[in-house]
Image (cartoon, rainbow, N blue to C red):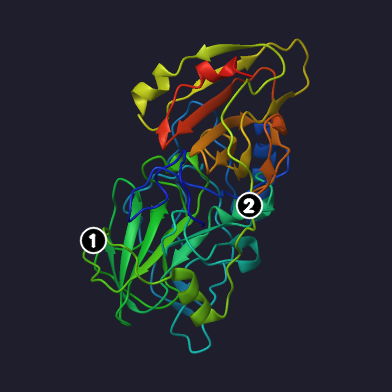
Amino acid sequence: MILSLVIVSAACNSPTPAVRRDLWPATHTPLTPLSTIAETATSLASQGAATALPQPSGLAPAASALPSPGNSIEARTIGTPTPTWTASATPSVSPTPEPPRVTLSDDGRYAFPVAGDLTQMTWTHFHWDGSNAVDIEAARDLPADGEEFLTFIQLPVVAVTTGTVSIADNRYGGLALLLDGSDGYSYYYGHLSEQWVADGQAVAPGDRLGRIGNTGYNTQYIEPHLHFSISTHDASDWRWEPDVNAAEQISSWLGLSWQDLDIETYPPDTVKGSPFAVPSDITRPFSEPLALNPDQGSIDLQPKSAGVEPVPVYATVGGEINVNRATVMGLRAQITNRPERTTVVYSFLHETAVADGDVVARGDLIGYVDPAVALNYMLFVNDLPTDPVPTLDDG
């Protein structure tokens, strides 16, 4: 995605650790109650669709118990590997009755790195940090509780070409793989939820390697996706600077185009005021989450609302919007003001009123939170988590 300055989640840039992730996929759809989503997921599972449920707040990601499908392309089968480590941020569901379609080049030498319906996926020309990597994500308009999104976050990743895979698990990329391609390139797959291949295993284009996920340092705070990068270096470990543009390489193989966001310009702005128009209580101070994770300092704000209707949440700074769907902190929205290197993040939203790439001014409606749920509120200034309490009464 495009060059960013500050972020909530450091994990997505797997080969090169960073402190920000930007331009997350968006949804205008209210976050359906967990009971309703559970019923939907059960129904989809009974129909054979891959499903995933949001994680309740405060709980660690659940380990996936999904069976690992065989690496079959059309009529060819090379077995059913066993995952080496399961750490999925999504719960156990039934697999699809038919393997998702693998998209191959005309000559059969290359495959798109994720199997499934490409119309339900999106990626940009450059990674959010300006590097040559890509994040392959669910299409921005898919609702978080819809069948298409729930299917996407369970899709398999596949070998893009013939070669040998090696396990490349690391702190930032989580469950990761390297493919030493016979074409002279090295391919990196990061943030997987499952691995279905053994270290040193030979693979062919389209062979299934594992499952999309969000493992890795802080990546549980963003939705499942594939971090994919390409290098001319030897595939000895994951610490390389990708020197081949992955989006351009995919385009050359398959004729597929990336989808960049066109974000309008906006002026510098500073964070001021409360995200609520009603009084609120600080139910968890900044120091508590900061002690658990130095990159995730935040406060919890409980609105003082006597009603049962969702409480409006407002922008406390002007800037560009990024919305992230299924995470361990529910539905999340962030506002980044690039000129001031400032980002605010709202978590556990009931629904959003903004879309990915929107530009807002301070005071604009961002979304809603249930009156019984505390809003998790984060502030980053110059790439560092900062206590937002002094800004709350500075409106």
Q: Is residue 47 positioned above or below 101 on the image?
A: above
- Measured as percent of width and height from the top left, residue 377 is found at 55, 26
Q: In the image, what residue occupies the spot 62% across and 21% down?
A: 273
Q: Amino acid at mark 2?
A: Phe
Residue 237 badge: 1
Residue for point 28% across, 62% down: 240
SS at circle 2? helix
Instruction: Give the secondary structure at mark 1.
Output: loop
Is residue 104 something that shows in the picture? no
- Name of the residue lying farthest toward the bottom: 107
Query: Residue 301: horizontal and vertical position, in percent?
Result: 58, 18
Labels in figure, total = 2
Numbered tag placed on residue 382 in the rendering: none
Q: Looking at the image, which is closer to me, 236 or 344? A: 344
Residue in view at x 68 percent, y 40 percent: 360
Q: Earlier in the sequence, mark 2 or mark 1?
A: 2
Residue 95 drawn at (x, y percent): 55, 56
> Can residue 282 be spotted in the picture?
yes
Q: Quadrant of the C terminus?
A: top right
Task: Say what amino acid the circle numbered 1 marks.
Answer: Asp
Q: Position of residue 300 (x, y in %)?
A: 54, 19
Q: Read off the residue under disc 2.
A: 149
Classify residue 368 as left or right of residue 377.
Answer: right
Local crowd size for mark 2, using a 10 Å CA cut-off: few (<14), some (14–19), many (≥20) = many
Query: Could you give the CA–CA distance between mark 2 and mark 1, rounded to whole angstroms?
Result: 32 Å
